[in-house]
Image: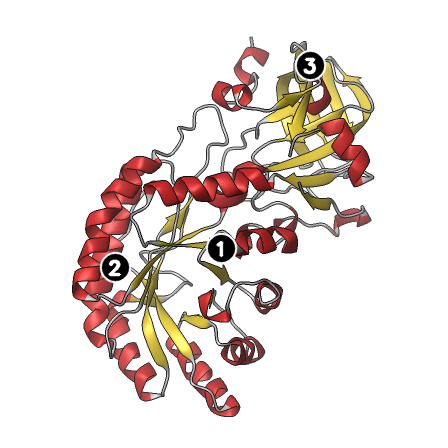
Amino acid sequence: MADDKKKPDIHPALIAALPVADGQLAIGGLPVERLAARVGRTPFYAYDRALVSRRVGELRTHLPEGVHVNYAVKANPMPALAQHLAGLVDGFDVASGGELKMVLDTPMPAGRISFAGPGKTDAELEQAVAAGVTLHVESVTEARRLAAAGQRLGLQPVAAVRVNPDFELKGFGMRMGGGAQQFGIDAEEVPAVLGEMQGLGIDVVGFHIFTGSQNLKAQVLVDAQAAIIDLALRLADGVTGGLRHVNIGGGFGIPYFSSDPRLDLAVVGESLQGPVDKVRAAHPGAEVIVELGRYLVGESGYYVTRVVDRKVSRGQVYLVTDGGLNHHLTASGNLGQVIRRNFPVVIGNRLGAAATGPASVVGPLCTPLDLLADKMDLPDAQVGDLVVILQSGAYGPSASPAGFLGHPPAVEVLV
């Protein structure tokens, strides 16, 4: 009975929607074994560009006309993916000088790029000012350092104030606003900071207000967006020339587990129309920006790793693979999960095969934390078979300890 409680944590609709070719999972139209041969080795990540394009198209359909969609590069900074997205989204949001350098190589104009995150170095501030991107200022100290960077370069910095809101909403997988935070300037301090920034010669264009991530409840997002825009309008009197930039963050979640609902995007988009109209009525030149990372790319990605050993220990089957938490820390449960749950996992080259019993998928690392699937009901996988972790397009290799124990990094491909 114990094993009955640990059957596959995969939503039936997710499995039903998987593309199949020759009895195998098809990624970008290619059977996974053929794709593995094309890549040249395992483990690897593959991102399906058609799925990314489709997701952006769905957003355009449901969001109010004229709302800008920005991609949060931290979700997946693969250069080829950024190049693809540069032709689909309205802007990029970066969180380091390294990400900024990468996106400046894409066709995205510098004026459509913003730079957020605490702890920006003086070199990063100068890099951003020289490039002409919009800085999301996280503290009064950073504002002063930004002004000094502009003076050294003889350029006027462009900035939005990141606001830590004076409200807190529940339902987000990771809370990034409300209460005490390392992110942003407390809302009650913003008027004074705005005055100082503009006195320092910074071109303040508006606000960045972000409450959290990975939310699957439409009503929570609706409430958050309405509250964020009300706060931005309340603070707007301190912005000389009026609002031009209102980044309301994102927080749109994707389903990972069988109990996860799919976000009702139609409800979110329809409910956003009223708040957007309020902004446009008060500040006709303002751009309302939705900043999304995981929601744009998470479901387009697959992590593919090969079984190198199959063993049975006191009745428990273990499939030992050539990749593990060093490549996919998120799937191992060691990046944000309080109670570990299995990501959706399939045997990619045996997609039509019936499950034969529980098996645990473990990586090659010398730690019990290297667990990719715990007692999932899987087909009878053997050495050489390909284990595929679905929903792996966000927070994969760049969020994992690739150097741990010296194994080769995972290859990344866009197909």
Q: CA distance from mark 3 to mark 2?
A: 51 Å
Q: Which residue is mark 2?
A: 166
Percent x, y for residue 11? 49, 22
Q: Which residue is mark 3?
A: 379
How many badges with numbers are in the image?
A: 3
Q: Is residue 115 visible?
A: no
Foreground mark, 1 or 2? 1
Which one is in front, 344 or 181? Answer: 344
Position of 8 with respect to 243 (left or right) is right
Mark 1 or mark 2: name the one nearer the start of the chain.
1
Chosen colour scheme: secondary structure
Tell me what residue is drawn at x 69 percent, y 14 percent.
Answer: 379
Q: CA distance from mark 1 to mark 3?
A: 37 Å
Foreground mark, 3 or 2? 3
Q: CA distance from mark 1 to mark 2?
A: 24 Å
Relative to 224, residue 255 above or below: above
Inspect the image, locate mark 1, and give the three-letter code of the amino acid beneath it. Ala
Q: Which residue is mark 1?
A: 72
Pointers 3 and 2 in contact (CB under 8 A)?
no
Foreground mark, 1 or 3? 1
Pointers 1 and 2 in contact (CB under 8 A)?
no
Label disc, if present, on residue 42 of the rendered structure: none
Mark 1 or mark 3: name the one nearer the start of the chain.
1
Image quarter in which the N terminus is found: top right
Q: Residues within 10 Å of mark 3 (few under 14, many from 20)?
A: some
